[in-house]
């Protein structure tokens, strides 16, 4: 099996960002964390106003990415409560929060100094 290129991963991350925003994901950001973390290259962080919107965002990401020939998630956690869904795709991880948990965990603060998707395009 061929190794996934950085450009393919960046394209998939871009698809994820668009899919989140299509379902009204708020403040969607993609952070290039690979230089700091050895477990993944990218974090995508977004949020929805309520559990139904969090579910719609996660479902849309999974469907749109698969339809575009992208990978399937290695694992998905948090779909039981829909307050913080983590979608692990190996080379990138998607965090979908409800508004309260996004504010509480403030995960964006941790990554504000790393390059973002916009900075790498």
Image (cartoon, helix red, strand yellow):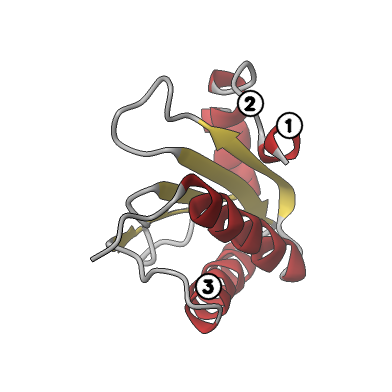
Instruction: Tell whether 37 sits left or right of 85.
Output: left
Coordinates of residue 43 in the picture (x, y in percent): 50, 41
Q: CA distance from mark 2 to mark 3?
A: 23 Å
In the image, 95 versus 72, the foreground residue is: 72
View extreme (bottom): residue: 67
Viewer-proximal residue among 80 and 88? 88
Residue at the spot x=63%, y=63% of the render?
Answer: 15
Residue at the spot of label 1: 119
Report the residue at 59% width, 21% height from top.
114
Q: Give the distance between the C-alpha atoms of the residues marked 3 and 1, in whole angstroms.
A: 22 Å
Quick check: 13 left or right of 70?
right
Q: Earlier in the sequence, mark 3 or mark 1?
A: 3
In 3D space, how far apart are the residues under numbered discs 2 and 1 (Cα atoms)?
Answer: 6 Å
Rendered view: 55 above or below 31 = below
Left or right, residue 25 beside residue 105: right
Outermost residue, front side: 2
Q: Quadrant of the C terminus?
A: top right
Lower sequence index among marks 2 and 3: 3
- Where does label 3 land, which residue? 65
């Amino acid at each position: 099996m061929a190794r996934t290129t950085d450009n393919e991963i960046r394209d998939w991350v871009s698809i994820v960002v668009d899919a989140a925003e299509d379902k009204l994901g708020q403040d969607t950001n993609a952070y290039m964390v690979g230089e700091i973390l050895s477990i993944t290259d990218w974090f995508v962080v977004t949020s929805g106003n309520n559990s139904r919107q969090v579910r719609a965002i996660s479902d849309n990401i999974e469907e749109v990415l698969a339809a575009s020939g992208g990978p399937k998630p290695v694992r998905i956690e948090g779909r039981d409560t829909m307050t913080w869904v983590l979608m692990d795709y190996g080379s990138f991880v998607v965090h979908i929060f409800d508004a309260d948990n996004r504010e509480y965990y403030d995960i964006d603060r941790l990554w504000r100094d790393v390059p973002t998707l916009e900075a790498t395009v």
